[in-house]
Image (cartoon, grey):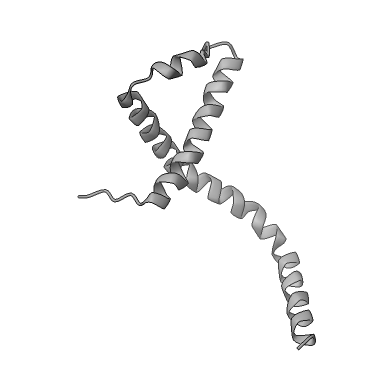
Amino acid sequence: MSIRVGLYDFFAYTLPGMFYLAILVFWIGTVKQLVIDFYVLKDFSLIVLFIMLGSAYIIGLLIDPLVYWWVRLFQRKNSHSAKMAFDELQNDTLGSI
């Protein structure tokens, strides 16, 4: 079984995954469970960078359905307003022709 990851998929899951990891690390730092030292980042090897990118991709991939559900939860409440705006735009466009 081959695993294919396109460039769009890589960035669409990895960037949010890095954001989620950063939020988690900063949150752990605020509750004083982890001391954050940014000078350590310059000493990371290539293997550690690949592990961080891989974990960010996996976290982004796992959290994406939750985010999609969250967006759809609020999008349903706005359907009537969206239909009214579309109808108004359609009438304005057809009226000016």
The answer to which image quadrant residue 28 occupies is top right
Q: Position of residue 40 (x, y in %)?
A: 45, 14
26 on left or right of 88: left
Q: Toward the viewer: 79 or 12?
A: 12
Q: Toward the viewer: 28 or 13?
A: 13
44 on left or right of 70: left
The residue lying at 58 percent from left, 11 percent from top is: 32
Tally of numbered tags = 0
Q: Position of residue 71 (x, y in %)?
A: 60, 51
Give the quarter of the figure containing the C terminus: bottom right
The residue lying at 70 percent from left, 58 percent from top is: 77
92 on left or right of 5: right
Residue 40 versus residue 89 in the image, above or below: above
The residue lying at 33 percent from left, 49 percent from top is: 5
Residue 42 versus residue 86 in the image, above or below: above
Q: Position of residue 50 (x, y in %)?
A: 34, 31
Residue 37 versus residue 61 in the image, above or below: above
The residue lying at 66 percent from left, 59 percent from top is: 76
Q: Residue furthest left?
A: 1
Q: Residue furthest bottom?
A: 97
